[in-house]
Amino acid sequence: MSPSFIDALLAAPRPLVMEVKLRDPHGADLLGPRTVTDLVTRYEQAGAPCLSVVTGRWFGGTPRLLREVTAATQLPVLQKDFLTRPAQLEAARALGASAVLLTAALLPATSLTRLVTTALDLGLTPFVEITEERELDTLPRIAECVVAVNNKDIRTRERDRGDLGRSLRLLPALRAAGCRAPVSASAITDPHDAARLLDAGYAALLIGTSLMRTGDLTGWLADLDAARAGVAA
Ligand SMILES: O=C(O)c1ccccc1NCC(=O)[C@H](O)[C@H](O)COP(=O)(O)O
């Protein structure tokens, strides 16, 4: 049996969730001449422990894209979309997802509780995204969730430049609330910044645009590894 999304992430030596995302927030194409299968294979070869796929239409996605990704890999896959109903979580599982995005800012507390419970009952890892400390107050079963700090603002379609300081500021509150798998997500463009976030105590990072855009994925990851070794020395 494959490991759950959260277990695969926590066991990874280089804990990056590599994201399949067809368009940037301004509508620019990120895939280029590659196929989705080429990209998934490349991420796998690069050692990704888990993948993410943006199926939200703001970023050029569709539910069919989730199936394309899960058909091309055995790795645990996160579906990133505006998921608000239990039926959408059942559909995600049927299409092969292992984790589902739940955006705390967009969900009333009662819905968030119901969706976390439903996801866990279905064997899916809830990937709960927050931008403010108070969103942790109503989050149930936090030790079983991945909790991601989004460095951008989804309410403005992530057209802002992002604020990695938000991740650094919120990490102590995440740990204090019992989160085992804190993730920093969005706007991570530089391997040195990525190393800094991991060194600060993040269990993992989620990176889309930078990995989609780099012409040298191996080099990007080598720079991250070198920066982490430097940080640790
Ligand atoms: O964050 C959301 O609520 C969301 C909902 C629906 C579709 C996408 C959503 N977020 C997208 C992302 O958060 C980013 O694609 C992801 O964090 C990677 O960001 P980046 O590295 O800046 O491309």
Image: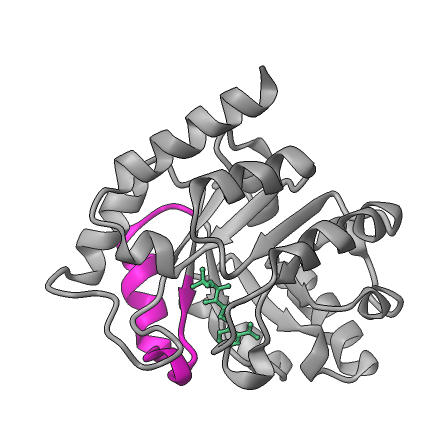
Residue 150, percent across and down? 61, 64
Q: Which residue is drawn at 76% across and 49% down?
A: 171
Which residue occupies the extreme left position in the image? 33
Q: Residue at x 27, y 42 (%)?
A: 217
Magenta range: 53-75
Magenta stretch: includes residue 41: no
- Whether residue 98 sits left or right of residue 135 in the image: it is left
Judging depth in this view, the residue of 69 and 186 nearest the camera is 186
Residue 201, percent across and down? 69, 37
* Image quadrant where residue 101 sits: bottom right
Judging depth in this view, the residue of 193 and 38 nearest the camera is 193
Judging depth in this view, the residue of 61 and 124 nearest the camera is 61
Q: Is residue 57 above or below residue 123?
A: below
Q: Is residue 86 above or below residue 33?
A: below
Residue 216, percent across and down? 23, 42
Residue 15 appearing in the image: yes
Judging depth in this view, the residue of 12 and 134 nearest the camera is 134
- Whether residue 187 sits left or right of residue 117 in the image: it is left
- Whether residue 67 sits left or right of residue 184 in the image: it is left
Magenta stretch: includes residue 61: yes
Residue 96, percent across and down? 42, 61
Q: Is residue 232 above or below residue 38?
A: above
Q: Which residue is drawn at 36% across and 55% down?
A: 210
Q: In which quarter of the image is the C terminus?
A: top right
Which residue occupies the extreme top position in the image? 233
Q: Residue at x 60, y 20 (%)?
A: 232
